[in-house]
Amino acid sequence: MSRLVLSRKLSLFEGMDTLSAIQARRAIKHYDPEHRLTDEEEKTLLEAAMQSPTAFNIQHWRFVLVKDPEVRQQIRAAAWDQAQVTDASLLIILAANKAAWQDPAAYWANAPEGVSDFMLPAINQYYAGREQVQQDECMRSCGMAGMTIMLAAKAMGYDTCPMDGFDFDAVGKIINLPNDHVISFMIAVGKGTKEAWPKPGQLPYDQVVINNTF
Ligand SMILES: Cc1cc2nc3c(=O)[nH]c(=O)nc-3n(C[C@H](O)[C@H](O)[C@H](O)COP(=O)(O)O)c2cc1C
């Protein structure tokens, strides 16, 4: 039994703990084009993504599910013809609203008394006039949500491929991206049909783990 099939079976029937999902996840590029997630699976995956943390709880990620085959084809043409764009069960574009900090009422609506009085002005103070911070925050938040999606998908028995190999402006136009939103990257999710090649080269631990200061 291939590693791919084995990891899918393990995750489906025995559940997969977080560390196992982290170890088993690979960027998979070939997918069964006939397979689709059920509505329930799709909701489970996206609701998991929505549990990802955001600074000040601004939840500014927006998950664009591209299901229309024609739109997928257009995105594939803007993505170096990468097959996973059209063949994966789900194509999720992770975008974020750079202006979400301007409308903070909902983010602390259920907080204990006094907390939202403190938080709302703090949000404004942190982001107002700081465009680079607004942009960076979108990338941080989408990065974390993307990892949640990839690990949740693995735990559900699916494979994923994170992707930034595409023309961002062209894809923005295709999906009618609002001016105050930005695309971070996209993720193909589905039933992998071909294993990834073995990891091509991991850097040594001491090169990437720094104790205290550089
Ligand atoms: C931000 C980002 C963008 C990527 N873009 C692409 C892409 O456009 N096409 C692709 O096939 N793989 C893409 N990858 C996958 C990487 O090549 C892959 O994650 C890396 O080689 C490590 O392999 P692994 O994820 O299987 O461990 C991307 C990964 C990341 C994190």
Image (cartoon, rainbow, N blue to C red):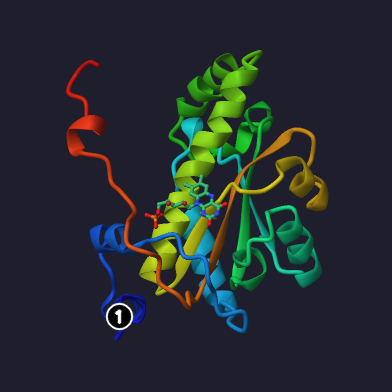
In percent of width and height, residue 205 lies at 19, 38
* Residue located at (59% from left, 47% from top): 164
Q: Taking 154 as reference, is 51 above or below it? A: above
In percent of width and height, residue 79 lies at 68, 54
In this rendering, the count of numbered labels is 1
Q: Taking 37 as reference, is 106 above or below it? A: above
Specify the quadrant that holds the N terminus. Answer: bottom left
Would you say residue 179 is visible in this rendering?
Answer: yes
* Residue located at (64% from left, 63% from top): 85
Q: Taking 152 as reference, is 32 above or below it? A: below
Q: Residues within 10 Å of mark 1 (few under 14, many from 20)?
A: few
In percent of width and height, residue 117 lies at 52, 22
* Residue located at (48% from left, 78% from top): 193
Specify the quadrant that holds the C terminus. Answer: top left
Viewer-proximal residue, 112 or 100?
100
Viewer-proximal residue, 108 or 1?
1
In percent of width and height, residue 8 lies at 36, 78
Residue type at numbered disc 1: Leu
* Residue located at (40% from left, 74% from top): 157
Going by the image, does 118 lie left or right of 129?
Answer: left
Instruction: Name the residue that disc number 1 marks.
Output: 6
Viewer-proximal residue, 201 or 128?
201
Residue 33 occupies which quadrant of the picture? bottom right
Q: Taking 76 as reference, is 144 above or below it? A: above
| CB of mark 1 near ligand 1 (< 8 Å) | no
Viewer-proximal residue, 131 or 111?
131
Would you say residue 108 is visible in this rendering?
Answer: no
Q: Circle 1 sits in a helix, a strand or a loop, which is it?
A: helix
